[in-house]
Structures are given as C-alpha cells and as structure tokens.
Image: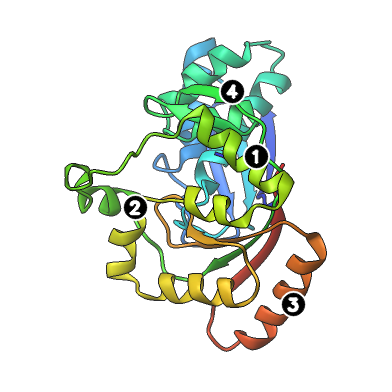
Amino acid sequence: MQPVSLYDEILLEVGDGKGIFIECDNRSVPSDETNLVYRAAKAFFEATGINRHLFIKIKKNIPVAAGLGGGSSNAATVLRALNEITSQNISTDNLIKIGAGIGSDVPFFIAGKSSIARGRGELLEPVELPKFWYILVNPGVPLSTQWVYQNLNLTKSNEDINITISKVLAIYRAGRGGNQQVLKGLVINDLEAVAIKKYPEIKEIKDTLINSGAICALMSGSGATAFGIFLDEHEAIRAFELLKREQKTRGWAFFLVQGL
C-alpha cells in the first residue's frame, strides 16, 4: 500500500459538552454514527475516557466508494488529530490498535508510510517504493467493497496472491531502472475481474491510460478507480492534460498524484 498526494480536508473543533457532530460538503457521505470518522472519534473517547463535544467538518476531494481509502484516511486523521489536541500522547502502535477496530485500512493511514499490510491490515511492514507519478481515473460509479468481496472466490485462483518483500524490491528496482516489463508483470489486483464484470468501463479506463503512455494500469483496491503508473513527471502531466481534454464528456474524474 502506498500513500499518494490526494487528500480530503478535515476541521475538528473540541468544546465543552458532549456529542459528536459531522458536516460534509458531499451529500453521499453519512453524517451519523455509520461514518468512519464518527466511529474513530467514539473509539478514541472510549479508549481515553474523554467525553467532549466534537464537531468535524469534512471537505471531500477523494471520490467516495472509489477504492482509494478516503473514509479510512479520514478516520485515521481524526484519531491522530484528537491524540494531539487532547495531549493524550498515545503511541502510534496503540493508535493503530484502535484504528484496526474501525476499518482494515485505517492502521495504514495512521502509520502513513508505504507498507506491506498483513492480517486484516493491522500488521504493517514499512517498505521503500519509487516516487511514481499516477493518474487516477474514477468513472463516477460507487462500488461497495463488501459486494466485491462477496462475489470473489479466491479458491478458484491458483496464482500466488501473496505480496513478498522480493516483489516489492523488484518493483522498486524496476521503477528506479525503468524496467517496464518487470513492473508490468508485478502489478496485479485479484479484485479487478469481479469489478469489471459489473462496470466494464473500468477496463476501458485502463486501456485509455495505457494508450496515453502509462507503463501499466490497474484498479485501485476494490474499485472503481483505476490508476496508470508513470516514471516521469512531465510525461504524467502531458498525459493528464490530454486525457482531461479528450474525456471531458465522459463524466470521469481525473487526478494527477505522486507517491509519498
């Protein structure tokens, strides 16, 4: 898993009284206890014994239900921010334990580093990856992670689904040395086939990215966002501007980001 330079903006206000209140500029994001940031704040208060009035305002820049971890990153941000605001000084390891109870991707965003994630996502092993440039393309269709996993049968695949350190090192060396063929062979997402059956436009987006100069393209997480990998910033910018002009009538959302 690799963090990238696309992020939401979150404002927290802690005051006297009780209750957690959420406001978001995207109407599709719930403002009740089903929101991961609500669950994060509640879990933090329960773990610390604090009971305060908390107002959370979210400005969404990451597409919703897009396979980019937007909700999980917001939850992680709330945990880290509350830890600082309330001067609790909870260790990162203990914050990760709290985050693991909220969602599988939350620990990764608390750690904030490129990592191999094991278990349910709470076991993180930091790795070094190249600072690739990415073009993210979201087709504007929400895809439920739960639905994707329910329709996936891992036992039907005989392929190696484990990411090992040797593979990560190969990705790093391929990126550093520009070995595109090696990189193409290492980029795999077992959830992709299930998602494409429901939304064929994901494959169309991948093909469009490849035709625009991406080394390879892949669906992110459980979809429906796909990304293309670029080694060179100028090539990524050129392709990004071209794609936006060519595909502006499709309703696709485009983001140019760098790995962090």
Element at label 3: helix
Say whether disc 3 or disc 2 marks the residue closer to the N-terminus: 2
Crowd rating for badge 1 (residues with CA inside 10 Å; few <14, some 14–19, many 20+): many
Distance, label 4 to label 1, CA atoms, is 45 Å
Element at label 4: loop
Label 1–label 3 contact, CB within 8 A: no
Amino acid on which the number 4 mark rests in the picture: Arg
Distance, label 3 to label 2, CA atoms, is 29 Å
Task: Say which residue label 3 marks.
Answer: 241
Crowd rating for badge 2 (residues with CA inside 10 Å; few <14, some 14–19, many 20+): many
Is residue 234 positioned above or below 38 on the image?
below
Element at label 1: helix
Closest to the observer, 73 or 55: 73
Is residue 105 positioned above or below 63 on the image?
above
With 5 as the anchor, is 55 left or right in this view? left
Residue at point 49% right, 25% down? 99
Mark 2 or 1: the one toward you = 1
- Disc assigned to residue 235: none
- Disc assigned to residue 52: 4
Crowd rating for badge 4 (residues with CA inside 10 Å; few <14, some 14–19, many 20+): some
Task: Say which residue label 2 marks.
Answer: 191
Closest to the observer, 221 or 186: 186
Say whether disc 1 or disc 3 marks the residue closer to the N-terminus: 1
Task: Say which residue label 1 marks.
Answer: 172
Amino acid on which the number 1 mark rests in the picture: Tyr
x, y percent for residue 87: 72, 13
Amino acid on which the number 2 mark rests in the picture: Leu
Amino acid on which the number 3 mark rests in the picture: Glu
Q: Quadrant of the C terminus?
A: top right
Distance, label 2 to label 4, CA atoms, is 40 Å
